[in-house]
Image: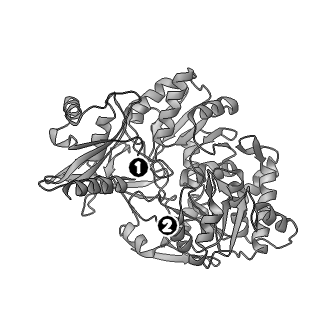
Amino acid sequence: MPSDVLPSSSSPWPMRFETGERQTRRANNEWPGHHLATAAALKAEKTPETIAIIEGSFSLDYATCLRRARDMARGLREVGIAPGDTVSFQLPNWAEAVIINIACALGGFVINPVIPIYRQAELSFILKDCRARIAFIPDVWRSVDYREIYGQLATELPALTHLVTVRGEGDLTFEAVEALGRASDIELQPADPDSAKLIIYTSGTTGQPKGVIYSHNQAARPIWASMAAWSLEAGDTLLMPSPVTHVTGYAYGMEMPFHFGTRTVFMERWDAAQAVALVREHGVNFMIGATPFLAELVTQSEKEQDRLDTLRIYACGGAAVPPDLIDRANRMFPQCRSFRVFGSSECPMVTQGCLEDRELAAHSDGRVDDWDVKIVDHQDNILGPGTEGEILAKGPSLFRGYTDPHATRASFDPRGYFRTGDLGTLSAEGVLTVTGRKKDIIIRGGENLSAKEIEDALHTHPAIRESAVVSMPDKRLGEGVCAYVIAQPDAVEPSVQEIADFLIGVGLARQKCPDSLVYVDDLPRTASGKIQKHILRRMIRETLEKREA
C-alpha cells in the first residue's frame, strides 16, 4: 500500500498515513488543522461563564476549565514531563479528567485514558506499552487502593516517574501540580495537529488489549458527524454514564463541549433511578450508551411513568442491541429517537442510526455517514448489496495505527481500509446491519451459524433478559452452541428443550438451538458493556473438561 509514516517532532509514535492523505483531508476541511487547545481557548474567550461540565453538585465553566488546564500543563512541565511524553489517567467520570485532557493538548503531551476496573496485569501491559511517564489515579475508590496497586508495579515500570493522587492524599496531589503551574512561567508548546494526541486501549473482548493511536486532527470528526446527523446544537445537554476512559465517554463526554458548545452531565457510576432524575433536573437532550443502560433506563421510566420529554436522542451501541429494546424505548419516549449505531475504538461512529425509520432503527445499525465502507469475502472480493461478509471501513475519523506496528500491518487491506472483524451486510441505500463477529461464527458440523442471530431470537423469549451465545467443543460436530442466559426477575428458567421448542417456533433451524444452556446472574463485560466472549468460551471449555476428567 502506498503510504508514509509521520513521526511527530515531539512524539515517539509513528503513525500510518496514505500518501497525500493529510493534504487531501485538510483541503476537504475534514481535518481542521487545529485541536482541543484552540477550541478550549475560543470557548473561554467567547462564552467564559457558560457551564461545560457538570459532575454532581460541581460544575466547570469554559474560563475555569482553560485556566486550570493551563496551570496543570505548566505543572506537568515543572515535574519533568516534556512535549510528546505520555500522560496516563485512571479515573472515574470526574471533572479532573477534563482538565488533564485539555492540559495535554495545551502542553503537547500524549494522553492515555485507562479504564478504572483494570488491575495489575492490564496496567503493567498498558503503561509499559504506551511509555507512560506520569499517571493520575484516585487514592481509594470503590474500596480499591490504587496507590497500593501502583506501588506494587513500581519495579516493572521504570519509565513511570510520577504518581499524582486525585481527591486524596499522596506524595504528589492534583492540587500540588496545579499550584506548581500557577507559579510557573514556562511557555507551553501545543503539538502539531497531525501528531499523536491519544492512545486508548481496546476493551480486550478477545484477549490482550491493543493501543489505538489518534492524532489531534481527527478528534472532533466523529462528533461533528453526530452533531449534523442528530440535529444537535450548542447548548444541548448530554448525560454521559459511559467511562471517560472509553472512546465514547472520552470523545462525546470530555471533548464535545469544547468543540461544539454542548454541555456534559457526568455519572460516576450507572444507576437508572439517578439517570432518570438527572434527565429531569438538567433537561438532558441526548445520550449515548451501551445496551444495559438503555434497557434499565426504559424499565425505570416505565416504573416512574416518566416519559423523559426533554430526551430527543439515544444512540445505543457497544454491545448487541436487541431490536425489541429499540422498539420498546421508542414507545416509552415519544419525543426521543432511539436507534442502533456501529463503531469501535479504531473507527468510531461508522453509522449514525436511522432516525427517520423506526423499523430500520431497530433492525439495522444505521446509515453509513462520513465513512467509506465495503463488505468483502474471505478473499477480499467486494460483495454486493445485502450479501454478508466482513465490514471494512475507511474515513477521516479512522485511527492512525496501533502502538504495535505488526498489529497495524495486519489490520489494514492494501487500499488502507481497516478490517473491523465484524460481519454484516450493506444495502444499496447505505444501511449497515451487523450480523456478528468473524470469531463469533460457530462452525457446527461444517455449517456456519451466527451467534447474533441466535441471541436475537433468544431475546424475544419472555423469560430471558439477556443472552450471549458462544461456541463449545463437540467431539462429533467440532463445535456446538452454548447459550449463557440471564433470566428475567422472578421468571421460571426454561429448560434446553423448552428453549429449543421456542426457537424452532419463531423460525430458527433446529441446528441453531443451544446444546447447552447456562443460567448466570451476570455476564463478563468490558467497561463499555461489551460481553467478553473469550471468557465465556473458556468457561464452557473448562466445564466440559472437568466433566470428562
Residue depicted at x 54% and y 55%: 117
Q: Which amino acid does label 1 sit on?
A: Ile
Residue 546 location (% of width, % of height):
25, 56
Of residues 535 and 234, the one nearer the viewer is: 535
Q: In which quarter of the image is the C terminus?
A: bottom left
Residue 195 can be seen, yes or no: no
Is residue 327 positioned above or below 446 on the image?
above
Q: Could you classify mark 2 by the number of other residues whose Cα lies within 10 Å: few (under 14), some (14-19), or many (20 or more)?
A: few
What's the distance in space between the residues labelled 2 and 1, CA to CA?
20 Å
Of residues 400 and 545, the one nearer the viewer is: 545
Q: Could you classify mark 1 by the number of other residues whose Cα lies within 10 Å: few (under 14), some (14-19), or many (20 or more)?
A: many
Query: Which one is earlier in the sequence, the residue at label 2 or at label 1?
Result: 2
Q: Identify the residue position indicated by label 1 in the image.
A: 531
Q: In which quarter of the image is the N terminus?
A: bottom left
In the image, taking residue 319 as reference, residue 78 lies left or right, namely right
Q: What residue type is labelled 2?
A: Ala
Q: Which mark is residue 248?
A: none
Q: Residue 121 carries which label?
A: 2
CB atoms at circles 2 and 1 under 8 Å apart? Answer: no
